[in-house]
Image (cartoon, grey):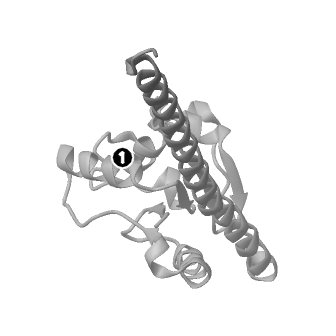
Amino acid sequence: MARIYAAYRRDNPHPDVERVLEGLAHVHGATAIVSAPSIATGATYRTVVENQIRECVGVVIIAGPEFNTEPDALGRRRLDNPDDLFRIEIESALKISKMMVVVALVGGYFLPDAKLLPRSLRPLTRRGVMNMGAHESFENDQNLLNAAVRRMLDGSARRTVRCLIVVLLLFTVVSLIAVVLATIAANTASPLP
C-alpha cells in the first residue's frame, strides 16, 4: 500500500498542523499517512526516519511560524542543530532523489529566504509550497493539498502497474525465445532421411 510521510514539529506545533493531519487522514485513510517513529534522538532516529521515508511515495512537510524561530533550551534556533528531529526528517526527505515533497505552511507562515536556512534545508524553498490560509480558505487549501497527495499516491499505483506490464512483457519475450530455441534444437537434432 502506498503511503505518505508527514513531517512536522511534534512538540508545541501550531494548532493548524493537527487540522492538516486530520484532513489528510480523513480523505486518504489513517494508514496512508505515517509519521516519525517514537525514538528519542541521534543517529538511530536518522536511520529509522530515512528508512521509513524511503518506503513512502511522498512527503508532506507541515510547518508553522515555529519552523524557523523555535528556540532550543539554550535559546538557539532549533533548526541550526543537526540533531533537531524535525530537521532530520526534512533532510531525509530532501536527500532521496525523485522523492516528491510538498510543503504545507500554516498559521500565516512563509518560508524564509534560502540564505536564512541551514545549507541542507535550502532545497526546501524550491519544492512545492502551499500556504494553508486562514479560516475562510483553509478548507479549499486542504482540498488542494489532498489533491497533491492523491497525485503522489496515484503515481505510485501507475508505477506499480507499469512495472508489472514490463515484467509480463519480459516474461513473454523470454518464453517465446525459449520456444524458438527449443524448436531449432529439435529440428537440428532429428536425423536427416
Q: In this orientation, which residue lies closer to the viewer: 140 or 154?
A: 154
Residue 157 versus residue 12 in the image, above or below: above
Can residue 77 be seen by looking at this rendering?
no
Q: What count of labels does the image hold?
A: 1
The residue that appears at 75% across and 80% down in the rendered structure is 139
Where residue 64 appears, as percent x and y from the top left, is 57, 63
Where residue 154 appears, as percent x and y from the top left, is 64, 62
The residue that appears at 20% across and 61% down in the rendered structure is 39
Where residue 164 appears, as percent x and y from the top left, is 54, 51
Q: In this orientation, which residue lies closer to the viewer: 151 or 138?
A: 151
The residue that appears at 59% across and 55% down in the rendered structure is 161
Can residue 186 be seen by looking at this rendering?
yes
Image-based side of 71 in relation to 33, left or right: left
Where residue 82 appears, as percent x and y from the top left, is 32, 39
Q: In this orientation, which residue lies closer to the viewer: 110 or 150?
A: 150
Label 1 crowd bin: few (<14), some (14–19), many (20+), radius 10 Å: many
**Amino acid at dot 1:** Ile
The residue that appears at 51% across and 50% down in the rendered structure is 68
Q: In this orientation, which residue lies closer to the viewer: 39 or 192?
A: 192
Image-based side of 100 in relation to 130, left or right: left
Q: Which residue is mark 1?
A: 88
Residue 24 versus residue 55 in the image, above or below: below
Seen from this angle, which residue lies furthest bottom? Answer: 26
Question: Which element carries disc 1, helix, strand or loop?
Answer: helix
Residue 72 versus residue 21 in the image, above or below: above
Image-based side of 98 in relation to 181, left or right: right
Image-based side of 138 in relation to 121, left or right: right
